[in-house]
């Protein structure tokens, strides 16, 4: 069971690092490096509104990823503290539930990253 927790914690750290690297990317570019221009002069107002909506969704997604990643870090810290408190051959149900919660949130973050654009 401790091996499961260790592997889960490593996966969360890797996902958090990946999320952090994506969050640190400037909001004005897509992963492919294309520029997102919200205020183009001389363009159709409808196109401008669509670009603003896309830019808003991207900013909202990045904010949500940042919050989810911070929550993952907090949960893994709590899990580590709980595992350190338990005995060698004993794991409480709280530890198992916390690991499942981390796994679910990590999967959610991973899916959000895959379906980014």
Image (spheres, rainbow, N blue to C red):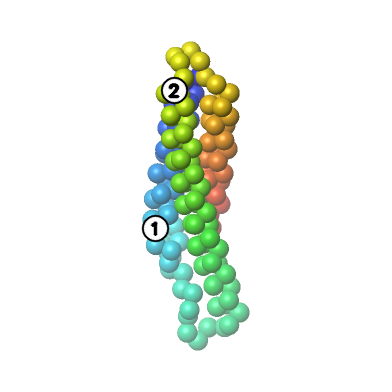
* Residue 97 badge: none
The reply to whether residue 19 is visible in this rendering is yes
Q: Is residue 79 above or below residue 62?
A: above
Q: Which residue is mark 1?
A: 25
Query: As drawn, which residue projects farthest toward the right?
Result: 46
Residue under the point 46% across and 73% down: 37
Residue under the point 53% across and 60% down: 60
Q: Position of residue 12 (x, y in %)?
A: 46, 37
Q: Position of residue 54 (x, y in %)?
A: 55, 67
Q: Is residue 38 above or below residue 115?
A: below
| Mark positioned earlier in the residue sequence (2 or 1) | 1
Q: Secondary structure at mark 2?
A: helix
- Which residue is more in the foreground, 71 or 10? 71
Q: Position of residue 56 (x, y in %)?
A: 54, 67
Mark 2 or 1, closer to the camera: 2
* Residue 85 badge: 2
Q: Secondary structure at mark 1?
A: loop
């Amino acid at each position: 069971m401790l091996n499961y927790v260790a592997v889960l914690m490593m996966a969360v750290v890797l996902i958090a690092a990946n999320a952090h690297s994506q969050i640190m990317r400037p909001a004005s570019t897509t992963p492919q490096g294309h520029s997102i221009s919200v205020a183009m002069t001389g363009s159709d107002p409808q196109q401008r509104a669509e670009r603003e909506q896309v830019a808003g969704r991207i900013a909202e997604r990045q904010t949500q990823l940042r919050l989810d990643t911070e929550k993952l870090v907090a949960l893994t810290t709590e899990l580590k503290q709980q595992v350190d408190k338990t005995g060698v051959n004993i794991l409480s149900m709280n530890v198992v539930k916390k690991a499942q919660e981390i796994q679910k949130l990590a999967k959610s973050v991973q899916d959000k990253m895959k379906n980014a654009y």
